[in-house]
Structure formats: C-alpha cells, structure tokens
Amino acid sequence: MRVAILGGTGGIGGQLLTWALNSGHDVTALVRNPAALAAQAALADHGVLRDHGALAGQGALAGRSTASASGAGTLTLISGDATDGSAMRAAIDGADAVLSALGPRGARTPGLLGTAAANLTVAMEKAGVRRVICVSAAGPFIADDPDMGAVIKMILPRVFAKPFADTRDMEAVISATDLDWTLVRASRLVDKPGTGRYRVRPDYAPAGGRKIARADVAHFMAAVLTEGSWLRARPAVAY
Ligand SMILES: NC(=O)c1ccc[n+]([C@@H]2O[C@H](COP(=O)([O-])OP(=O)(O)OC[C@H]3O[C@@H](n4cnc5c(N)ncnc54)[C@H](OP(=O)(O)O)[C@@H]3O)[C@@H](O)[C@H]2O)c1
C-alpha cells in the first residue's frame, strides 16, 4: 500500500513510520526537518527525498536515492510544512491512505490541526485519495462524556482551551467530508513501550481509562488501516 504519513518525526508518527516500512508499505512522509529522520538509524537504509517549496534545500538527504532495506517498504520524504497547501498536495498525491499524527509541539503553531486538516482534505479530494486516519484526542470532548467526573469536566477545558479548540476544529473539518475517515481519540499520552492491549470505545474514553502509550495509539491506527475498520467513526483508546 502507498501510505502518506504526517507527523512522522513525532512520538506517534515515528512509530507509524517504522510500522509502515517494516510492513512493506511504500511511505511518503511530509516533514519539516528531514535531517531529524536521517538521524534515525532505523530509517537510514530507506528512501529518497524530494525537496518542496520554501523549505527546499534544508534536506540533509537531498539527492539521496537508496533501495529499501530487504523486506521493507520504501520511504519518500517531502520537505515541507503542513500549513502549506502545495506541500500537502505533494505528500498526498498517489497515496492509497493517509495517517496523520500531527501535533502542535506546544503552542508553537497555533491552529495547526485545523489548518492542516483543511489542507489535507482539499489535497485528498483533488488527488482522489479516500482513506484517512488521524490522531485526535479524547479531552476536547469530555463535556459530553457520561463517565467523566464534573471536576475534570470543569478544569480540563479551561486549562487546555486553545489546543482543545484546535482539535475540535480538525475533527469538524474532517468529519464534514465524505472521505473514509477515522478520528482516533487518544487519552493522555505517555512514553511507554507498546503493549498491544488497550480498550476502545466509540467517542469517549473507556470508563476509567486515563492514559495510553504513543506506541499503542500507533498500534491501533495500524490495525484500523489494515482491517478497514472504524469508518466514519471516532474510537477513543485508553488502558
Ligand atoms: N499530550 C497528550 O496527552 C495528548 C493526548 C491526546 C492526543 N494528543 C495529540 O496527539 C497528537 C500527536 O502527539 P505526539 O506526542 O505524537 O506528537 P509530537 O511528538 O509532538 O509530534 C508532532 C508531529 O507533528 C509535526 N508537526 C508539527 N507542526 C508541523 C507543521 N507545521 N508541519 C508539518 N509537521 C508538523 C512535528 O514535526 P517536527 O518534528 O517538525 O516538529 C511532529 O512530527 C497531537 O495532535 C496531540 O495533540 C496529545
């Protein structure tokens, strides 16, 4: 399968990238800093870089063209920013499916998720790509969660007002399309080894589920892609 990955230098996205390559998929990754990927030994034997737009020339892998490691998929890096519509189109073109694990890296890119979702859906519709699986979050939707306590419902949305609004914007943009979307609502992310054992519930985190390893979010997204499950749905994942 040809898989486009957004956020491949991040926690969840890095796991997705490794899974996709090890599973023999041909991956195109939109990255702001190709050198960050070049530094990952696991990726050293994969792929080619295509520089794109304003960031052209930054890529440490520019010009490099290497056969994939034995048994693994190939990697094409598009150097660019998810807020740039033309970079997004370059990353999406020719894909069979998109995996997005974009995150705003703190407050450094306000409105990133909503803006990137608009670029993504336009690019997908133009390119005729239908399948997209995005990391979302359970937190921005706890107001309607029947199992969430009143205190948390009062505090969390105030503390995280801006990122929560951005996540809701992203979900609104994507769910308004007729694409084959899945919005994976992660609970609090932790950097622990993946277990492959977690609970999934439509819309809201499983009762009492408060956290999930980034590796297990990636594990679930990979399963959703492979199985073709949770179409036009918002599964929430937690332990
Ligand atoms: N923190 C939590 O507890 C929690 C809970 C639920 C859901 N989430 C959500 O989970 C998602 C992924 O989390 P994570 O920890 O895996 O993310 P992360 O490690 O912060 O990685 C974010 C990724 O997005 C990329 N990115 C950021 N801005 C970009 C831009 N303008 N153009 C292109 N790429 C850009 C980053 O690239 P660079 O390497 O270039 O920066 C990086 O690859 C986030 O959306 C987060 O909000 C978080």
Image (tube, grey):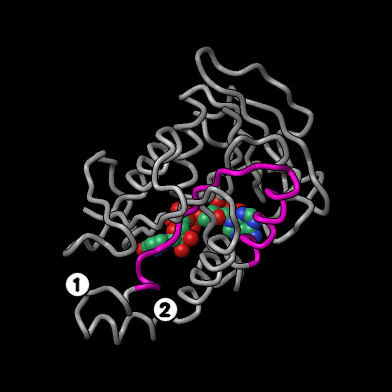
10 Å crowding of disc 1: few (<14), some (14-19), many (20+): few
Are the residues tagged 1 and 2 within 8 Å (C-beta)? no
Residue 85, position as x, y percentages in the image: 76, 57
**Callout 1, which amino acid?**
Asp
According to the image, label 2 marks what residue? 160
The front one of 108 and 180 is: 180
The quadrant in which residue 197 appears is: top left
Taking the image as shown, residue 130 lies to the left or right of residue 153, namely right
Q: Residue at x 54, y 55 (%)?
A: 102
Q: Is residue 224 left or right of residue 111?
A: left
Determine whether 142 is above or below 105 in the image.
Answer: below
Screen quadrant of the N terminus: top right
- Disc 1 is placed on an element classified as loop
Q: Nearer the viewer, residue 194 or 153?
A: 153
Q: Nearer the viewer, residue 229 or 18?
A: 229
Residue lying farthest to the top in this orientation: 70
Describe the element under mark 2 as helix, strand or loop: loop
Q: Nearer the viewer, residue 118 or 197?
A: 118
| Amino acid at the residue labelled 2 | Phe
Mark 1 → mark 2, Cα distance in angstroms: 20 Å
Q: Earlier in the sequence, mark 1 or mark 2?
A: 1
In the image, residue 176 lies at what x, y percent?
57, 64
Q: Which residues are magenta?
A: 115-141
**Which residue sits furthest left?**
208
For label 2, the crowd category at 10 Å Cα-Cα, with few meaning under 14, some 14 to 19 and many 20 or more, is few
Q: 103 left or right of 124?
A: left
Residue annotated with mark 1: 147
Residue at 58% in and 51% down: 179
> Which image quadrant for residue 172?
bottom right
